Amino acid sequence: MANTFKSDPIEFKPAEAKPAPDSTVGIVAWMRGNLFSSIPNAAFTILIMLGLANVIPDIIDWMFISSTWSGANQDACVGDGACWVFVKAWSQQFFYGSYTTDQIWRVNLSLILLFVVIVMSFTLPASYRLKVSVPLFLVLPFLCIAILDGRLVGLEHVNTDFWGGFSLNVLMAAAAIIVAFPFSFLWALGRRSDMPLARSISVVFIEFFRGVPVLALFFMGSVMLPLFFAEGTNVDKLVRVWIVLIFFMSGYMAEVFRGGFQAIPSGQYEAADSIGLGYWQKTLLIILPQVIKVSMPNILATFVMLFKNTVFLLIIGIPEVLQTLLTALSNSNWLGGHAIEGYVFVGVIFWLCCFGMSMLASNIEKKLDTSHRN
């Protein structure tokens, strides 16, 4: 009888992953690959570092070490550094303009509502996120206008002449973006339409608002637009400028959406047609989500552009934050030359907002990313 030998099964154990070589990871490897990868790169890096080493200490000294932070008026600014007392003294006007002091809570409430709606659009369950957040976004601009004006909600009326400051920049940009979003989508569809009339109107509209400088549009909205209203009709200047911002934003966003439509493969349209979806069902349920995903970087760039363009409202006398700064610099109690402090302050708060929008867009891109990566 033959002997049968049975060996124990050998369990496969993968070897542990070895760490990357020290020469390829870490700050030294990064600097070697990006800053000192060649002789010209190393030379430019050294020159830039020498320049920064010469400038940065003076900037830090001016902004923080030798600066003046406490005080109530210009007499407190006796050092050689920045006079942040100027920014502190005018901080309310910089953020709220001339809005009635005891009613500033209404401006804060409007900003909080904007923040809450944005947060809800990310945190709500996906099953009814769009059903709730989209209507809230569309209602928000008109609700904020009612709160700030006061008459429609039984509050003290505050004339738009007193609206201003950085809060006006934020709310004007947000209101224009929200209302312009659906309009730009329709203009993009009109430009791609097979109907000659719809396509011609869309092309004229888009090219006009993309081709005319925004300053010219502001002057047209402030001076020429009232000529098209019925005699005796008085539309507030802030509302007219808001309409101009909406049209301006719509023109640029329509081209962004058109690029997104062209990036969608024709198979997506054919698949939607094959299951019997109508035109609007196909467009809203199948195509539009993909268009937004593809166009998100350009959408963000357009949002940031509009937000920064709100400073041009000072040209027509709208007291946004930059106009408020110019008013503060011309005040007889602050004629000591504090323009640098004011412009640095305005630049920082705009940068913080734009950076926040960039981080928000990056988060949206990650949520919309459907690629399969290891």
Image (tube, helix red, strand yellow):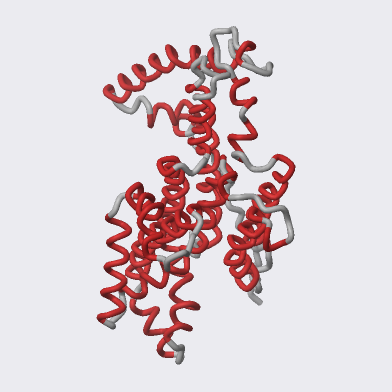
Query: Which image quadrant for residue 35?
Result: top left
Query: Which image quadrant for residue 152?
Result: bottom right
The residue drawn where x is 36% and y is 70% is: 188
The residue drawn where x is 42% and y is 51% is: 301
- List the single residue furthest toward the bottom: 276
Give the vertical position of 291 relative to 110 (above or below): below
The residue drawn where x is 60% and y is 63% is: 142
- Depth order, front residue of 78/137: 78
- Depth order, front residue of 52/228: 228
Q: Is residue 11 visible?
A: no
Q: Measured from the top left, where is residue 85 in percent x and y? A: 63, 20
- List the single residue furthest toward the front: 232
The quadrant of the image that shows the N terminus is: bottom right
The residue drawn where x is 45% and y is 33% is: 24
Q: Measured from the top left, where is residue 278 in percent x and y? A: 44, 88
Give the vertical position of 233 relative to 219 (above or below): below
Give the vertical position of 271 relative to 318 (above or below): below
Drawn side of residue 163 relative to residue 123, left or right: left
Q: Is residue 2 visible?
A: yes
- Depth order, front residue of 216/229: 229
